[in-house]
Amino acid sequence: MKALSSALFMVVFGIVAAAQPTTGAAARESPEAAENDRFPLREILIDGNENFASEDIIEVLGLDIGQMVNRADFESAVGKLDKTGVFEGYAFRFGPKDDGYTVTFTVQEAPELYAVRFEGFDISEEEIRARLREKIPLFGPKVPPTGIMARRIGDLLQELWIEQGNQTKIIGDINLLSDEEFEILYRPEGTIQNIAFTRFKNARVVPALTLQQKFNSVAMGVTYSERRLLELLKYNIKPLYEQVGRLEVKFCPCSVEPDTASKGLIVTIQVEEGPEYKFGEVVPPQTSFIKPEDMAKLIKFQPGDTANLVLVSEALQRYEEQFKGNGFINIRSQYDSTTNPEKKTVDVVMRLDPGYRYVFRKLEIEGLDLVAEAAVRKRWALNAGDHFNQHYPAIFLNRVRAEQMFDNLQTTDWQMKADEVEKAVDVQLIFK
């Protein structure tokens, strides 16, 4: 067997970059010949995946440990990833491991992946999902709303529907669950009825009119099912009750009646508001970067207050702003809440993950002549090595505009570039 070079070969979107072999028999051959030599595959690694399991991706690749492979086999495997329709980009790199190859496939998942649901079929949702998993590589709880996979799902559902003796069309709709969350709902066309109007019964703590105004703007025109209705209530109405401490609020039973004016449905929703909860123990984040007394000032609630969990999120947001002003540009926060049904209290523990502290490195300016640029640099207060204040560039540009430092200035903007190795930030100010 020919010796493996220590060189790594990289293929990105079909473009090959090969380092010259330097050892063994491969050193006497061209790079192309070295890349085409077959060796045993000893390791497969997947990088960049968040929603799709590595073992499922490896199954799609069609590569097996111990298989004799070369670059052409890896390129063929990338082609199989392309046919799944769930990735926007792919790359691979391979090199020596023991007496064979190790290969790493890097994937870039589609930016929009939505939960998928099925209604109106004669078989259970579990059976439908099993059928789709069998026929569609990488089909899972979330799928792209358009493209190859979306078309395959629609086609297979249509085949399944016809097999059951039906002729109507299968429709796939994208439904809004909340301001930032969507789902894809597949159902036979004849089962579709839309919500024309909603009304609430037994609502007292939050007035029924308030609920109707909020909910009708979201629900009117949406395809009706009780499951869909409950999801919309969870994301759009339940938060209104959580703000007033009603953490056990429940919705439905619900009733529907036809709306003759629109041919849709009028939905009546029964509300069980539940008891009011109060804040119990409140544990602020633990950190050495801000004094405990200053941390406490950022919390605008205390034990015994109505348990409005929105106030907890707002407190964490204030913490994040403090840290971003002190160099922690990747600060993350979260809280855990524990309810005590007997005492009707909620204990809250807040946590911060500051990450690394970044310093300011250099300032770049775009859109000004040399004289104007010199004037801007003279007024810029951050020095190289200072802890980077992420709020400062916007504050600085607001001051420039407010003081009318330049005539005919239309817009300003700024960007930051973080060096993850040096933990340093370069800032670019943009003037137009």
Image: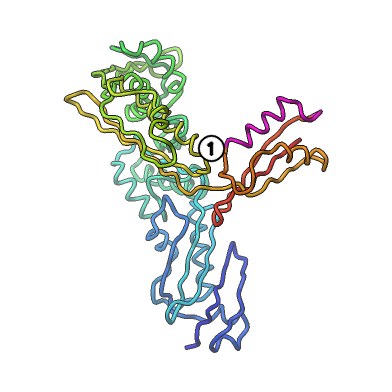
Residue 5 percent across, percent down from the top left: 53, 81
Is residue 343 shown above or below 52?
above
Decide: is 238 above or below 111. above
Q: Residue at x 41, y 27 (%)?
A: 297
Magenta highlight range:
391-408
Residue depicted at x 36% and y 14%: 199
User: Neighbour class for label 1 at 10 Å: few (<14), some, many (≥20)?
Assistant: some
Decide which of 139, 34 is in the foreground and name it.
Answer: 34
Prevailing secondary structure of the magenta residues:
helix
Residue 205 picture quarter: top left
* Magenta region includes residue 395: yes
Numbered disc 1: secondary structure: loop
Note whether residue 250 is visible.
Answer: no
Question: Which residue occupies 58% across, 35% down?
Answer: 391
Quarter that holds the C terminus: top right
On the image, the x and y values in percent for residue 299 come to 39, 27
Q: Amino acid at mark 1?
A: Gly
In this rendered view, identify the residue nearer to me: 293 or 419: 293
Q: Is residue 66 above or below residue 384?
A: below
Tell how many labels: 1
Q: Is residue 138 magenta?
A: no
Q: Quadrant of residue 225?
A: top left
Residue reaching furthest to the left: 342
The residue singled out by tag 1 in the image is 325
Give left or right: position of 142 versus 414.
left
